């Protein structure tokens, strides 16, 4: 999986207009006087790095949510977390609020936490019925989408175009300043997830088993969900609510390892998330070239059938 990620990043640096070979990319990276130095170092490279960081963060967020809630279809997009973050970000853009880029993830986190709490309150703490979680999460996400539409209605024509791409999820026109915003959140969030991995693995066995193992269930669950919300909000504040990467990556990692243990799956899940998002972004750039699709379209086309299949399997298991 790591080798696949390296190949995809190299392809992301090479493909586009102009198309470069690996040797030319290396020359452009090393030589500031190279005619393609700016294109590679200021456009393609930060976009690829952001794809890796965002995919990693979303995958870890999805794994924490699924295991902490003991629900295999939990994810930022299904619990309204990404939509809540989108509402706040849309308001900042449309209303031209004087918010520094570095402060945007903090505001997005507030929106994400509010939406997530609303879902958990609506289902009354019962997180073991995937269908119920999906339905309530879809309702909260729809409400957030309605708020976004209302906010967009207050904006100008230029704002609408920018927000359209943002709300579908996009890595276009992202630079090193965006990478600098996401990087500390992903590093800290993943580090905390590593520290929590064994306790979250116990939660995946059920609350009774986790309590028997001496794990503080409520505190561990709240910490894991807060970390997951922070990761999803940081990514959403920069890239938009990229759908289904958080849902798919943990499932792919579990199948590849043949294990459901959070402690074992965490690292591979992050790699899978990075591969999924970088591959989706590369495909969205090239499929209809020179027209570029939002990356969220590509992830949704794969994620919706996967969600239906996962729900069917969980229903058969019951």
Image (spheres, grey):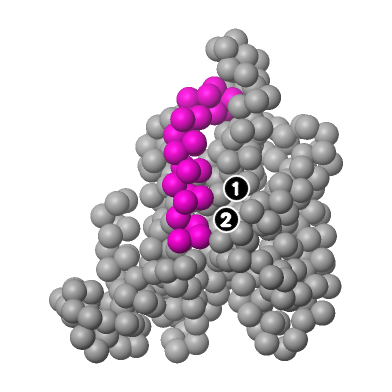
* Quarter assignment of residue 166: bottom right
- The residue labelled by disc 1 is 230
- The residue labelled by disc 2 is 234
SS for dot 1:
helix
Question: Number of marks in the image?
Answer: 2
Q: Main secondary structure of the magenta part?
A: helix
Relative side of 82 to 263, left or right: right
Contact flag, marks 1 and 2 (Cβ < 8 Å): yes
Magenta residues, start to end:
180-204
Q: Residue at x 68, y 87 (%)?
A: 158
Label 2: how many Cα within 10 Å (few below 14, some 14–19, many 20+): many
Q: Position of residue 298 (x, y in %)?
A: 52, 69
Q: Residue at x 55, y 12 (%)?
A: 213
- Classify 20 as above or below 215: below
Q: Position of residue 127 (x, y in %)?
A: 72, 34
Relative side of 64 to 221, left or right: left
Relative side of 24 to 65, left or right: left
Determine the CA span between mark 1 and mark 2. 6 Å
Residue 194 colored in magenta in the image = yes
Q: Residue at x 32, y 51 (%)?
A: 1
Relative side of 150 to 1, left or right: right
Of residues 119 and 206, which is closer to you in this image? 119
Q: Residue at x 29, y 51 (%)?
A: 2
Of residues 180 and 118, which is closer to you in this image? 180
């Amino acid at each position: 999986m790591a080798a696949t990620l390296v190949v995809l990043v190299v392809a992301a640096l090479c493909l586009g207009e102009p198309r470069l070979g690996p040797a030319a990319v290396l020359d452009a990276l090393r030589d500031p006087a190279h005619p393609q130095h700016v294109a590679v170092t200021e456009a393609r490279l930060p976009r690829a790095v952001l794809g890796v960081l965002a995919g990693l963060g979303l995958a870890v967020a999805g794994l924490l949510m699924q295991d902490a809630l003991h629900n295999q279809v939990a994810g930022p997009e299904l619990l309204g977390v990404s939509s809540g973050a989108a509402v706040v970000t849309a308001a900042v853009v449309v209303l031209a609020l004087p918010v520094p880029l570095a402060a945007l993830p903090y505001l997005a986190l507030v929106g994400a936490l509010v939406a997530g709490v609303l879902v958990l309150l609506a289902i009354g703490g019962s997180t073991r019925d995937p269908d119920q979680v999906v339905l309530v999460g879809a309702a909260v996400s729809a409400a957030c989408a309605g708020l976004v539409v209302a906010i967009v209605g207050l904006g100008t024509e230029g704002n609408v175009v920018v927000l359209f791409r943002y709300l579908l999820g996009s890595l276009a026109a992202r630079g090193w300043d965006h990478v600098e915003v996401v990087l500390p959140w992903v590093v800290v969030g993943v580090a905390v997830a590593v520290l929590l991995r064994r306790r979250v693995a116990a939660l995946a066995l059920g609350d009774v088993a986790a309590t028997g193992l001496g794990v503080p269930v409520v505190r561990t669950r709240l910490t894991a969900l807060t970390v997951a919300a922070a990761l999803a909000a940081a990514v959403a504040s920069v890239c938009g609510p990229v759908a289904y990467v958080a849902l798919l990556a943990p499932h792919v990692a579990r199948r590849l390892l043949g294990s459901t243990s959070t402690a074992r799956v965490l690292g591979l899940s992050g790699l899978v998330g990075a591969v999924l998002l970088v591959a989706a972004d590369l495909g969205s750039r090239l499929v209809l070239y020179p027209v570029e699709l939002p990356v969220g379209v590509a992830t949704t086309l794969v994620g919706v059938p996967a969600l239906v299949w996962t729900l069917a399997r969980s229903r058969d298991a019951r």
